[in-house]
Image (cartoon, rainbow, N blue to C red):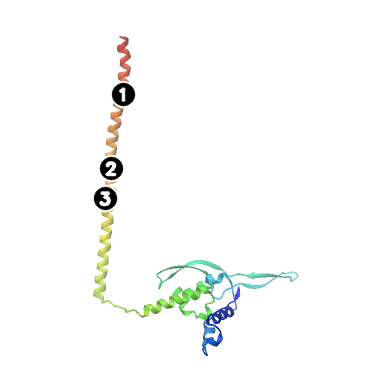
Amino acid sequence: MAFRSREMMKKIIKKIGGEHNLAPGVKDQLKKSVPDRKIVMGRAHRGLYAGRHIQFGNRVSEGGGNKTKRNWKPNVQDKRLFSYILDRHIRVKVTTHALRCIDKAGGIDEYLLKTPHRKMDTEMGLFWKTKIEKMYQDLGGKEVVFFSPEDEANLEEQFKELRFEQKAARRESRRKIFGSASKQTKDEPDGGKASEHATYNSESGSSHADFNEPLVANA
């Protein structure tokens, strides 16, 4: 665990070269962007915890009122959340409280965009938030083309024809594969029987010859 906001401010100011290099008012803006949580779990840097961290307290016995130290850890789950802007699933560790917040916001993208920086108290959350914000900005700068209803209907028909052609090609390839296999299985039994019959005849003929030779010799 660490005193998150203080350490982050110290690191930022150290990288800049000291407070004397900061313009007036910049430090206050940085404080707004830095998470305001005092204590953050070490493993919380690798997930979305939504402010739920380890808590400390005492366990009190019923009879004597004896107190023993104990802690409460958050309920952390390993989930795959779908991101529409990334068009893929994100595997992330989240608390049950964070899952409820994501469902309420309408998805992982909306949750990261709506949550301010000062409440995003984990490094992973800040990373995904900045990444998704940048991608939305890039999408906002692109041109959007709208199709007329006729063009949309033509595109749908073309897609349907393409699907039918793909299905027909798959069906034809299967027919060729399984048709050739069935022909081979049909041809194999006759040939096998003929070869077996020929070998049996040859063996039977040789046995008769061997059996008749002694009779002729005795005669």
* Distance (Cα) linking label 1 and label 3: 42 Å
Label 3 is placed on what type of residue?
Answer: Lys
Which label sits on residue 204?
1
Label 1 is placed on what type of residue?
Answer: Ser
- Say which residue label 2 marks: 184
Quadrant of the image occupied by residue 157: bottom left
- Say which residue label 3 marks: 176
Estimate how packed mark 3 is, as few (under 14), some (14 to 19) or many (20 or more) residues with alpha carbons within 10 Å.
few
| In front of the other: 13 or 113 | 13
x and y, in percent, of residue 201 in the image:
29, 26
Which label sits on residue 135?
none
Q: Is residue 71 left or right of residue 45?
A: right
Query: What residue is at 40 percent from the left and 78 percent from the top?
Result: 136
Check disc 3 and report its element: helix, strand or loop. Answer: helix
The quarter in which the C terminus is drawn is top left
Q: Is residue 72 left or right of residue 26?
A: right
Label 2 is placed on what type of residue?
Answer: Gln
| Observer able to see residue 107 | no
Quadrant of the image occupied by residue 214: top left
x and y, in percent, of residue 124 in the image:
50, 72
> Looking at the image, is 19 positioned above or below residue 184?
below
x and y, in percent, of residue 194 in the image:
27, 32
* Distance (Cα) linking label 2 and label 1: 30 Å
| In front of the other: 84 or 139 | 139
Count of numbered tags:
3
